[in-house]
Image (tube, coloured by chain):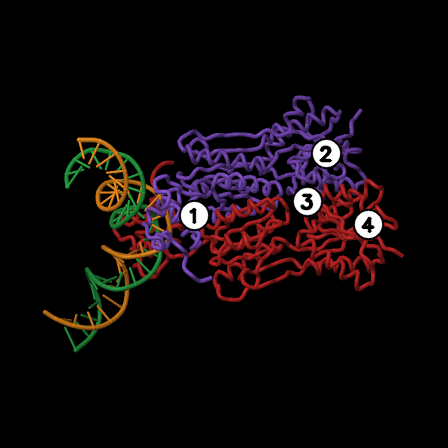
Chain colours: A purple, B red, C orange, D green
Amino acid sequence: MNTRRVTLNDIARGCGVSRATVSLVLRGSPLPAADTRAKVQTELKKQGYVYNRAAANLRQRRSSSVALVVNDLSNPFFAEFAAGADEALGAAGYVTLLGSTSESPERQQTVLTSLMEHDPAGIILSPAEGSDGEALQQILGTHVPVLVFNREPTRVQWTASHWDYLALANRRGAELATRHLLERGHRRIAFFGGHADSSSCRERRRGYADALAVAGLAIEPGPMIETAPTRLDAAAHSAALFAHAPAPTAAVCYNDAVALGLMLGLATRGLRAGRDFAVTGFDDIPEAAVSTPPLTTLATDPRARGRQAATRILERVRHPGTDAVRGSVPVRLIIRASSEVTIA
Amino acid sequence: MNTRRVTLNDIARGCGVSRATVSLVLRGSPLPAADTRAKVQTELKKQGYVYNRAAANLRQRRSSSVALVVNDLSNPFFAEFAAGADEALGAAGYVTLLGSTSESPERQQTVLTSLMEHDPAGIILSPAEGSDGEALQQILGTHVPVLVFNREPTRVQWTASHWDYLALANRRGAELATRHLLERGHRRIAFFGGHADSSSCRERRRGYADALAVAGLAIEPGPMIETAPTRLDAAAHSAALFAHAPAPTAAVCYNDAVALGLMLGLATRGLRAGRDFAVTGFDDIPEAAVSTPPLTTLATDPRARGRQAATRILERVRHPGTDAVRGSVPVRLIIRASSEVTIA
DNA sequence: TGCTTGACTTGGATCGTTCCAAAAAGTAAT
DNA sequence: ATTACTTTTTGGAACGATCCAAGTCAAGCA
């Protein structure tokens, strides 16, 4: 527990060659003679040598880590995302520096500052709600590639910055869900839940409005019903849907958690989703498939998104010159029983 | 995007002092004169200096990161755990090196090797199922403090190693749940789900057996019914509970996911948990409170566990000499409707 | 004036690697 | 034995910080 760490010098001394030779062996260079290589390798094993990547990185002026900063790890969507990103980064020989911000922009500043001191090769950032782009740019500087995921900070000079941006096709997805409900004959369709100041929520609501506009219908029940993006808060606010007659017959929910909460809320009013009222979600979290009734939703495959984000930031690390990419990833409508009810 | 990183030397040159002085200012030493300090500080800001912790750590022969290796990040329990650990580590000025192993011992070896090269101050490890203690010891060596969480690897020389161990009070928890069912009058109680080769599962089953033994009752329905610790697999195996008459009237489930799966399985047989059959879970995942019916379970507060693990490993980093600690954290029985049914 | 004191400041060595130019060792032909 | 190679090995200078012993300089005092 207390002996000094074994270094290249120890190995070199141990088998009578120079530090440089050991280094060559270590990195699999073809230069060292076969018997030298063998001698060194047994010595490495014998002394239990552990490579010190920090020292190597210092000399080589490059980094072997990528920072992954998420706004809410306890959200299964982001947990899966993180797992996918870590998987892809690890496969590419990078190590993941984790930071979680709990949706606090202040904590996010602290976390990013600390991570920057570890000189990450790149940063994958899913910003906390209400993040200020200028503050972020201040901290992140212009040396490190950044991939912004899922949400847009306010006041970002996208034209000036070289940040990549990757988001779900929120607008398109909500439009798909709404069209699906329209096809089942619903005419009074509400958009339910989420915070109006979250960009993903605004986009989803826009997609919903798009579909209604094409069908020549009005937004129900007028002003948006805001909730925290959680089951509990959604359940608590579900009564607001029925405040004015005629009540809607279907709701496009901000995400699955909200949809599951709404289904609970419906149950307490004696309504059953899929029979008396149609509900759609967003994300396709694992519970969506096994809830009662199973939830119609939009699959986003967060683990694949994590891998995608990792792949893209590594691409950017390798080619820093190229233009920033703004991408949106397609989502897939998964039709289940919660939207089964049709209106004559 | 391509300019060199700003170093202490640049700052020193920029304001006509020595590197050492800048370093003193940076670390808030009282030595530098007030006006020197001010001069340096404006220069730091002007050039946009970013501290290079790797270089500092190299010189100081210490580390400012802790590795966190979990077996399954997509499991909400571990996601919360990771969030809690990261929170506490961050607050102490450490950065979290994330590794996720997807329950694969091979991947775990790779991940740990890679993390070790980054010289973490300590390691929090929730081992993949089937981890081999000797292989782990081989990689981790004896220099770095390790806290094993939640599961015991096979073949660990606990007496020889200085690893700390932190686990839930699995045995005690399952015993509590079983006693609770006994108090409600149940006499034929099964233990349902989980893998027999997972140590947490074996412990829970032992607690269950303890309670039955005290009551002088037999284990139902004899051999353990094994399932993957997921909803789907549990639902698929639930019929096995009713293979022999008389069937059990209650089940202590390996965890919440299994319990929720079992409730689904019961539903397909026309049985309702809490009315026709009593069910308990383990973990108190967020859904447990809002399922239908709400699930009686054991609260473990994974976020607090994460903080606790972080606190302990940091304690160990500060005092490497002290003896290893084997700790178990208490769990709390949360009684909800799923176990409401009483037997006359 | 010289000498001590205290408040600041500094150059050089160091951490564990990699890079590089050049030395050493081996081989073959003259 | 000398030259002209090729193959292998090597010492020393980086990388960007910290530590430490020693330096400067003005004030204070005899």
Structural distance between the alpha carbons of marks 3 and 1: 38 Å
- Same subunit, tags 2 and 3: yes
Label 2 sits on residue: A279
Residue type at mark 3 is Asp
Badge 4 marks a residue whose secondary structure is: loop
Crowding around mark 4 (Cα neighbors within 10 Å: few <14, some 14 to 19, many 20+) is many
Label 3 sits on residue: A233
The C terminus of chain A, quarter of image: top right
Badge 1 marks a residue whose secondary structure is: loop
Q: Position of residue A71 (x, y in %)?
A: 55, 44
Structural distance between the alpha carbons of marks 2 and 4: 27 Å
Badge 2 marks a residue whose secondary structure is: strand
Horizontally, is A121 left or right of A175 in the view? left
Residue type at mark 4 is Gly
Structural distance between the alpha carbons of marks 2 and 3: 17 Å
Q: Nearer the viewer, mark 2 or mark 4?
A: 4
Horizontally, is B22 left or right of B318 in the view? left
Which residue is nearer to you in this view: A118 or B67?
Answer: B67
| Disc number placed over residue B274 in the picture, else none | 4
Could you tell which of marks 1 and 2 lies nearer the N-terminus? 1
Could you tell which of marks 3 and 1 lies nearer the N-terminus? 1
Q: Position of residue B314 (x, y in %)?
A: 51, 59
Q: Position of residue A34 (x, y in %)?
A: 37, 43
Horizontally, is A112 left or right of B16 in the view? right
Q: Is residue A277 visible?
A: yes
